Amino acid sequence: MPKFKNASPWPLPNPLPDDTFQLALLAIKRINTVDLQSVISVYQASEIEEAIDPTWIVSSQSKTQEKLITKLPLDKPVYVEGAFRVWLRATSIAYFVLRSEKVPVNIPKEDPDDVTKFNSLLDEDSDEQQRNVIVRPSVHEQEDGIILATCATGTSSQDSLLSWIRFLQMKNPYLKDIPVLFTLRSPSTAVVPVNVSGLDRENREESSSEEYRTP
């Protein structure tokens, strides 16, 4: 409806750009609006000496995520996961995340009805009780893990994601001592805008044509 035209908190240019790099920038910015301190960085994989896939990388990370990396245990790996999809109108862009397992918080189990352990602020043990207050988790600390960074690359290949990790290690030296595992759950393909209406039209044309095309 026309009155809802400008209701979205993530306005997009009309028409959308055809350049996949510009689309990736829009997608990563939209994903990371949950943290206003997120910084969008653009890298060229060719700047890494051992890079195999010379493509562009759009990465996002905030100061909070950088601090979360320094608190991770060195004996547990972090994971590069994806590709996930974010939709910009009828166009989808693949993105990936760097995730770690959630660090368990030891919460002492106490009976809330036990009044024998009631402490007032005037008691000597009140300071110790205040030190046991649990810090509220950030928006990046979810139930299934901690999101440490997000990115989109020009080819969505594992080689380009490896270059992304190399850039993150330059920015986060602590990450060099943590093992990184790639758990890609979908085939590696180039970041090509997927237009729903365009796909439907192509499918109709292919179904109506009797010409046999070799792979």
Image (cartoon, rainbow, N blue to C red):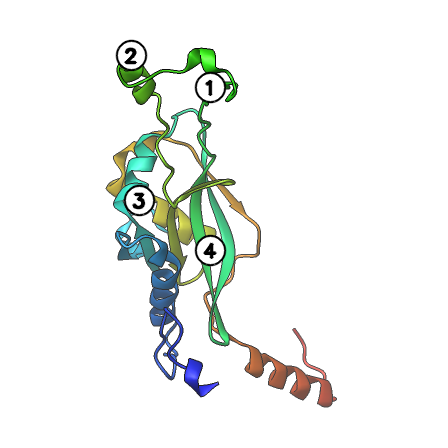
Which kind of residue does numbered mark 4 sit on? Ser
**Which circle, 1 or 4, is nearer the viewer?**
1
Which kind of residue does numbered mark 1 sit on? Pro
Residue with the mark numbered 3: 168
Which kind of residue does numbered mark 3 sit on? Leu
Q: Which of the marked residues, 3 or 4, is nearer the chain's N terminus?
A: 4
**Which circle, 2 or 4, is nearer the viewer?**
2
Q: Residues within 10 Å of mark 3 (few under 14, many from 20)?
A: some
Q: Residues within 10 Å of mark 4 (few under 14, many from 20)?
A: some
**Which circle, 3 or 4, is nearer the viewer?**
3
Residue with the mark numbered 1: 108
| Residue with the most extreme right position | 210
Using the image, tell me which numbered label, if any, was put on residue 123.
Answer: 2
Residue with the mark numbered 4: 157
Residue at horizontal 45%, vertical 22%?
106
**Which circle, 1 or 2, is nearer the viewer?**
2
Which kind of residue does numbered mark 2 sit on? Asp
Compared with residue 171, is residue 89 higher up or lower down, i.e. above or below? below
Q: Say which quarter of the image contains residue 196.
A: bottom right
Q: Which of the marked residues, 1 or 4, is nearer the chain's N terminus?
A: 1
Q: Residues within 10 Å of mark 2 (few under 14, many from 20)?
A: few
Work out how far the residue at label 2 is from the one at label 4, CA to CA, in angstroms. Answer: 60 Å
Whether residue 68 can be seen here? yes
Q: Which of the marked residues, 1 or 3, is nearer the chain's N terminus?
A: 1
Work out how far the residue at label 3 is from the one at label 2, CA to CA, in angstroms. Answer: 47 Å
Q: Position of residue 114 (x, y in %)?
A: 50, 16
Q: Which of the marked residues, 3 or 2, is nearer the chain's N terminus?
A: 2
